[in-house]
Amino acid sequence: MTSIVLLSVLGIANLFLGFLRSNRILLPAALVILLLAFGANVLDWGAAPQSYFNNMLTIDNYSVAFTGIVVLTTLLLLPFSEKYVHDGEANLAEYYSLLLFALVGAIMMVSYDNMLMLFVGIEILSISMYVLAGSDKRNVRSNEAALKYFLMGSFATGILLFGIALVYGATGTFQLTQIGAGVANPANASFMPMLYIGMLLMFIGIGFKVSAAPFHYWTPDVYEGTPTFFTAFMSTVVKTAGFAAFLKLLLFAFSTAQSFWVPTIMAMTVLTLLIGNVGAVAQSSAKRMLAYSSISHAGYLFIGLVALNGKLSENGIFFYSLAYSIATVASFAVLKLVIDQRQREDYDGLNGLAKTNPLLAFVLTVAMLSLAGIPLTGGFFGKFFLFGAAVDKGYIGLVVFAVVMSMVGIYYYLRPVIAMYMRPAADEAATTPIVVSGFQSAVLVILALLTILLGVLPGIASSLL
Amino acid sequence: MLTAVLLFFPLAAALLLHFFKGGTARVVAFGAALLEFVLAVVVAVASKSSAATQFAIDQPWIASSGIRFHIGLDGLSLLLVLLTTFLVPLIILASFRHDYKNASAFYALILFMQTGLIGVFVSLDAFLFYFFWEVALIPIYFIAGVWGGERRVQVTFKFFLYTIIGSLFMLAAFVYLYFQTGVNGAERSSDLLAFYNLSLSAAQQSWLFWLIFIAFAVKMPIFPFHTWQPDTYTESPAPATMLLSGIMLKMGIYGTLRWLLPVVPLGVSQWSKLVMILAVIGIIYGAIIAIRQRDLKRLIAYSSFSHVGLMAAGVFSLTQIGLQGAVIQMLAHGVNAVGMFFVADAIERRTGTREISDLGGLTRHTPVLSVTFLVMLLSTVALPLTAGFVGEFLLLAGVYEYNAWLGAAAGLTIIFAAVYLLRMFQRVMLGPDTSLTATFRDLTGAELAVLAPLIVLVFWIGLFPNTFLHISEPSIIQLLDIVKR
């Protein structure tokens, strides 16, 4: 709870820093705020569950763990926001503040106990993201991304709200656990159709936010147009929070209606995996590939939902989100440096990077191997735990399909690696090293080490919950 | 404790290598690899000859899941660890003549791979085994992909996809077995012994066999999973080719011995005939293609493919003599292949070509080279007194015991090998000079330093095979007990 208060209050305070006309202090200030929030969050670990706002919000180990992921991700991502520091016209303080507010929304999404709190959380997160998607004001693509994201997103939010209303109609409550009791109650049998429709609409709403197929159409365009820094935030924090919220919903509210939603979610899983992976193969832009890859990872995370295997699922989704977030931050960070300084988003822009910037190439390689799920990296154990939970529940066919899809994944994740290590630089401009500050290098090293640490000693994060 | 040191010392050396550059990195890497070999010998001397696992370490790896960091050595593992640690310093030494760009990364990757290889040979937990299995793959992919020949990008990509997809099947089987260990409410475990003690139905074993087998079949490779191999061997830089053929190929055979035969014995007995036939097809097919090759390195690659078929056939004969033959042949083939590829590399470096038709008359300029080449070659052809003879003789005896017709067909490998290798020798070493070979220099001292230990081993295995057979015998007998119970 302290982390929500801290981030909200200091987020507003950060806004006032904008008046100082000194953009240099903004990044350190934001980092300090995040560190404070992270520290406050860690202090909540292991304490007895604490409810706030008339039991609308509960801080327990589950929420602390996922809050940890989103705050850590933002913290590790922030050092790569520097391009804007040199852009005199950008309202930098606002961007940082919006980012902090988005984080508040994400934290509410992982700790909600009441549908309204879920809705408020999603809205805080989404509205901040709509603005940030368009933050590159003079870039048409960025404007397009913001508008697209906003139009589609608000539509999805409407559907979500409608779903919440129907669920309320069927069970008479917004509280998660009471909905769960209502669903299980045989006296409510006549309301089941309404409940099912409500559930479906909610799945659509949240499915949109986590870019699950068939509600993924906005993703590639929005990811491509949005400034890379915020794309990274979108594909990590938003996704983690979305899945944590989804899992909570299924675990506490709808766990007794499995016979209805398992086929639904299963269909979404298969579609998401297929579209994400096959779509990624066809891309020639690394950034777009990562957009499709983020769709495919939503598919893998869905497997944890389908299995809904108590602790196995919770831990699996936690570990996967953590490994995925770290690897994604690393890949976007490297990609952003390359895009900003080489003005190229395609794979060829990465050619010869291993010669000019061995560190960047190494970090991106580790990240790609992790996303591909190759051992020695956290991504492997993420998949391992999720697939294990599904096998345990007997979803062998689904796991086989997912494994085949991750074979496809190996193909497109290796392409940047091949470009960096095995192809010569595309042109003269690409033979000058990319400028990376010492701080950024340090963060990149941390990202790579964390990924490898998770891949070698997965025990440190695999049974926290 | 010793096993852990053996396992992680190369990794530590690889990390340390970051602080050295160029020539120094090379020397440091060689020193580290040599030290590792000494360490392995110390372990070998300290070990007892028995089927029991020695120097074991058993620690929880992933909390509360029954997946453990369990490593240890028995006779079979020990031999392969010895082979690995023996060959790696030689492979590093063999590369001294080349000036690889970014040398510290190059040698760090070789040492890193050594950790993966040793890990494969000492792991006693299925997931740990799989983990090291892939750890060994990643560095070799980069070595071959970054420092390889012209077509390296496509070729290594294919190699990587093939092997990783093959091993994913194995992983799927392991996950299934892991959950099977917990069906009766028991603690789940991925330990080797837990897998051995599973009672699986014949139907389960039947499909599990293929899942696991594909991973090993791709690695060895067995016909028809071999299509990545000739290209990869040809396009890789010489040290990578030596690592691939000398050591990595043995991962497949070793995996079959440890993780396939005893785990799904019913599946093995159901399918062994088919696998034997595939292996024999591979022997003949590889040999026939080898006869037609014009490229020196490619010819040796196909020869390696042909010979590995015989090893696989010996393993699936499920006879003690066949299995022991496979073990000794793993050592012999490791030595032979590294020696052959090294000579091919020495020739290519001097003349700039691998085309057999461009070469000729080397004997007159290079008595030392041609003698050493001949020794390696005759050992590959399985001439008595050499390492290859012992291995192939035992293997053929095993296959013959299984089925006389298959034994006869597999026996063709020796005849064919004589045909393509002696013909190659004749055209490269004898005959008139060509413009490229007229100014050929003989082996230098450093090159001889690579070949001398190999030659010593060729005769050692050839004359006193019991030194090695003795080490692996208890393990093999125990293995057959488990398979046949």
Image (cartoon, helix red, strand yellow):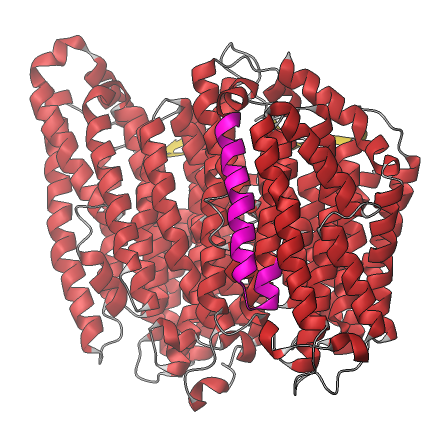
**Residue B331 versus residue A443: which sits nearer the camera?**
B331
Does the stretch in magenta take in B276?
yes
Picture residue at 82% right of the left edge, 51% below the top:
B458
For this view, does B318 lie left or right of residue A414?
A: right
* Residue B485 in view: yes
Residue at 78 percent of width and 74 percent of height: B363
The answer to whether residue B187 is above or below residue A118 is above
Decide which of B273, A246 is in the foreground and name it. B273
In front of the other: B409 or B97: B409
Q: Quadrant of the N terminus of chain A?
A: top left
Magenta part, dominant SS: helix
Q: Would you place residue B132 above or below residue A35 in this image?
A: above
Question: In which image quadrant can residue A220 be found?
Answer: bottom left
Q: Position of residue A358 (x, y in %)?
A: 57, 73
Question: In the rendering, at what x and y percent does residue B134 appear?
Answer: 57, 47
Q: Is residue B279 magenta?
A: yes
Instruction: Please determine whether, in this image, residue A224 is positioned above or below residue B6.
Output: below
Q: For residue B109, say whether it is visible.
A: no
Q: Which residues are magenta?
A: B272-300
Q: Residue furthest bottom?
A: A428
Vertical arrangement, residue A64 with respect to residue A389, above or below: below
User: Could you tell me residue A309's position as x and y percent?
Assistant: 39, 25
User: In the displayed structure, does residue B256 sit left or right of residue A215?
Assistant: right
Q: Which residue extends farthest front? A: B431
